[in-house]
């Protein structure tokens, strides 16, 4: 039966939605109209607890006045300025503030900051820096990049090439890239709290690819320290250390894609800090502005950066950038975001809540269809047994049920991914778990 359109309901005809089954969505739309703190409000006035921090980005919760005011101030001071051969103070200021909290601390020297407009742009930028660096040090044959099987690195051609999600690249051409195996062996690691015990040896797959292609053809290996969109896959204890060692031994740069894990998600400012493994390049976005204004940043090791600052002084060292690199309004949002994170200790709050989070999520063990529960910081991945012949269907139904009952979670394949704003209170952690439990019983 057709229902009368609400006064403010758009026709849904013109907007081509990303990553969405558009025709299915338009038959049963879900529209979010407002957001405040831990909650969204739907267009028909229902409150929905945000269990995903938007899309892993609204780390300080919604509707932060300080960020809104900073944006407003900047918009009326200077809305935009070009960033080629010309700069604006706020971008330099923001880069300096980011450098002060850069992944790995001062010793890591990951303090050269390149601004982008998104996670995908950060990935493209990082890959280009890696290849340009190799060329600058006389290793121009190193143009291949290694990614991993179950990995998501955004949607640029570089990102889909190194990303291992088949759906993400099936119909598109790719740049030279190859993929390491790293899928977690659930049979050995199921329901492990925190980092899996087994699987560090998966890092040795890089040796296989080095033997196959020759180290002299490989510029870099890119990994998410924790794979988020690919289904919350955690590295086994020792895995990243081993990867670092192998990469270093073969002159291969190590890139951490911290678009999700950056800015407090795993309980430390960056996953680099959590694991104590220092990569050469780190990509970020999302939480950098609390999700408010699109922005990303690539942290590059001083030595990598400096190798490119050679040649004639009037030559452009890296022919790369975006109209919106270091956008003044995004920088204003980012600076205010860092202030909020610092004042409320949000970059480590996930660590303080991690134990409660872990115990609450693992208490779901035993509910129908759950074959694994994984956690780190304020992230949980609850893996469901796929329904025969319909991969992903069960998790999607759980997502729909939770949403109908007032909690937003995410279904990625057969994994329920949960990653709330870092301001979450323990009672809200319980609420998320309760809704998921009820949904699982209903879907069963
Ligand atoms: N890298 C990783 C690890 C991501 O999770 C994402 C987005 N979820 C991206 C890159 C792409 O970011 P964006 O959607 O901002 O382009």
Image (spheres, grey):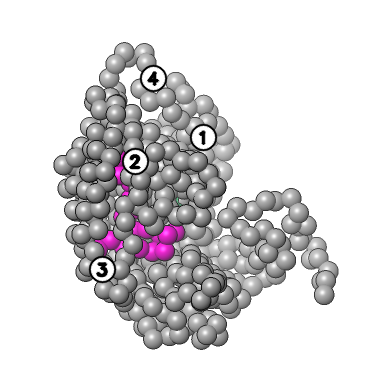
In the picture, the disc for residue 145 is 2
Query: Mark 4 vs ligand 1: CB under 8 Å?
Result: no
* Disc with the residue nearer the chain's start (1 vs 2): 2
Disc 2 vs disc 3: Cβ atoms closer than 8 Å?
A: no
Disc 1 vs disc 4: Cβ atoms closer than 8 Å?
A: no
Q: Position of residue 361 (x, y in %)?
A: 38, 77
* Disc with the residue nearer the chain's start (4 vs 3): 3
Say which residue label 1 marks. 324
Q: Position of residue 364 (x, y in %)?
A: 40, 82
Disc 3 vs disc 1: Cβ atoms closer than 8 Å?
A: no
Q: Residue at x 58, y 36 (%)?
A: 76
Secondary structure beneath dot 1 equals loop
Say which residue label 4 marks. 316
Q: Position of residue 335 (x, y in %)?
A: 42, 44
Q: CA distance from mark 1 to mark 2?
A: 26 Å
- Residue range highlighted in magenta: 220-236
Q: CA distance from mark 4 to mark 3?
A: 45 Å
Q: Residue at x 46, y 35 (%)?
A: 326
Q: Residue at x 80, y 63 (%)?
A: 7
* Disc with the residue nearer the chain's start (1 vs 4): 4
Q: Residue at x 44, y 20 (%)?
A: 85
Nearest-to-viewer mark from 1 and 4: 4
Q: Is residue 222 magenta?
A: yes
* Disc with the residue nearer the chain's start (2 vs 4): 2
Estimate how packed mark 1 is, as few (under 14), some (14 to 19) or many (20 or more) residues with alpha carbons within 10 Å.
some
């Amino acid at each position: 039966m057709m229902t009368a359109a609400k006064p403010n309901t758009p026709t849904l005809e013109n907007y081509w939605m990303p990553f969405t089954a558009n025709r299915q969505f338009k038959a049963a739309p879900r529209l979010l109209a407002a957001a405040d703190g831990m909650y969204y409000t739907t267009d028909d006035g229902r409150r929905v607890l945000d269990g995903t921090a938007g899309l892993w980005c609204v780390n300080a919760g919604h509707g932060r006045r300080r960020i809104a005011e900073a944006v407003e101030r900047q918009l009326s001071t200077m809305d935009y300025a070009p960033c080629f051969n010309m700069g604006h103070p706020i971008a330099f200021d923001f880069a300096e503030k980011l450098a002060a909290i850069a992944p790995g601390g001062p010793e890591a020297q990951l303090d050269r900051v390149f601004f982008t407009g998104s996670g995908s742009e950060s990935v493209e930028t990082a890959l280009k820096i890696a290849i340009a660096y190799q060329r600058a040090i006389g290793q121009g044959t190193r143009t291949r990049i290694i990614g991993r099987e179950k990995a998501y690195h955004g949607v640029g051609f570089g990102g889909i090439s190194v990303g291992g999600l088949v759906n993400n690249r099936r119909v598109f051409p790719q740049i030279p890239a190859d993929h390491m195996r790293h899928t977690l062996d659930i049979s050995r690691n199921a329901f492990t709290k925190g980092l899996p015990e087994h699987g560090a040896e998966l890092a040795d797959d890089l040796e296989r690819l080095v033997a196959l292609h020759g180290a002299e053809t490989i510029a870099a290996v890119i990994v998410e320290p924790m794979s988020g969109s690919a289904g919350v896959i955690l590295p086994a204890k020792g895995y990243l250390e081993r990867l670092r060692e192998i990469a270093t031994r073969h002159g291969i740069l190590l890139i951490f894609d911290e678009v999700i894990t950056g800015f407090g998600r795993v309980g430390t400012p960056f996953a680099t800090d959590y694991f104590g493994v220092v990569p050469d390049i780190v990509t970020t976005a999302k939480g950098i502005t609390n999700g408010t204004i699109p922005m990303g940043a690539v942290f590059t090791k001083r030595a990598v950066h400096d190798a490119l600052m050679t040649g004639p002084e009037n030559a452009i060292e890296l022919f790369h950038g975006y109209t919106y690199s270091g956008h003044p309004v995004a920088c204003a949002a980012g600076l205010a975001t860092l202030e909020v994170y610092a004042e409320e200790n949000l970059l480590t709050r996930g660590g303080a809540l991690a134990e409660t989070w872990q115990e609450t999520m693992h208490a779901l063990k035993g509910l129908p269809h759950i074959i694994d529960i994984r956690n780190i910081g304020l992230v949980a991945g609850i893996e469901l047994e796929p329904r025969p012949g319909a991969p992903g269907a069960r998790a999607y139904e759980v997502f729909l049920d939770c949403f109908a009952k007032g909690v937003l979670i995410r279904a990625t394949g057969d994994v329920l991914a949960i990653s709330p704003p870092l301001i979450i209170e323990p009672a809200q952690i319980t609420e998320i778990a309760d809704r998921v439990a009820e949904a699982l019983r209903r879907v069963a």
